[in-house]
Image (cartoon, grey):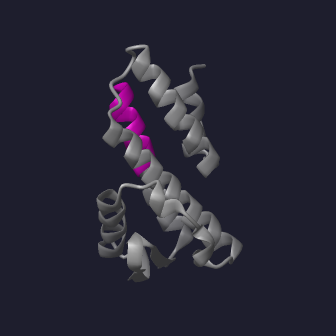
Amino acid sequence: MEEIDLYLNKINDCTITPSDIDLVIKMLKEDTKKGRIKATKEDIQWFEIYKFGLEELELEKSGESKMQVGDWRKNLNYSKARFFVDEMDELGLIENVSWHTQGVVIYDIKNTDVYRIHLFKKIKNALCELYGL
């Protein structure tokens, strides 16, 4: 089984985690170096956004304050984060969106199951597109 299959299976089983996304990013970079795929800097940035989305889901499920997200904003492309959050807001997946200085965003997830499905589809579609699946 190829490494990509492992992550696709985790998505299908709803078990992919933010730490898995770190490994996906590493895989994308390695496969790009080997010439298997052509993952751009922008592709990598989207996976960092998806990791943020998964972290928000974990925070929501744990009941912890979203203020504990910490320094994510230093690592994310602000315009992609803004697009990601605005899209979810328009789709009604999140509510009470509040943007603060330096790009910090706080929001409430309306339905964690629907949010998770939406996020997993985005991750899966991005992987399938990069790997031609």
Total number of numbered discs in the rendering: 0
Is residue 65 found left or right of 41 in the rendered image? right
Taking 11 as reference, is 28 above or below it?
above
- Any magenta on residue 128? yes
Nearer the observer, 129 or 106: 106
Residue 51 point in image, percent of width and height: 52, 53
Identify the image quadrant of residue 37.
Answer: top left
Nearer the observer, 10 or 52: 52
Residue at the location (31% across, 70% down)? 86
Residue at the location (63% across, 46% down)? 19
Nearer the observer, 119 or 107: 107
Identify the image quadrant of residue 132.
Answer: top left
Residue 59 point in image, percent of width and height: 63, 69
Residue 50 point in image, percent of width and height: 46, 53
Residue 17 visible? The answer is no
Residue 33 point in image, percent of width and height: 42, 18
Identify the image quadrant of residue 13.
Answer: top right
Give the overall secondary structure of the magenta segment.
Answer: helix
- Any magenta on residue 130? yes
Residue 4 visible? The answer is yes
Residue at the location (48% across, 66% down)? 114
Residue at the location (58% across, 76% down)? 66
Nearer the observer, 35 or 6: 35
Work out which quarter of the rendered image holds the N terminus and state it: top right
Work out which quarter of the rendered image holds the C terminus and state it: top left
Taking 111 as reference, is 14 above or below it?
above
Is residue 66 found left or right of 78 in the rendered image? right
Check the image and name the residue furthest to the top: 34
Q: Magenta part of the protein: which range?
A: 122-132
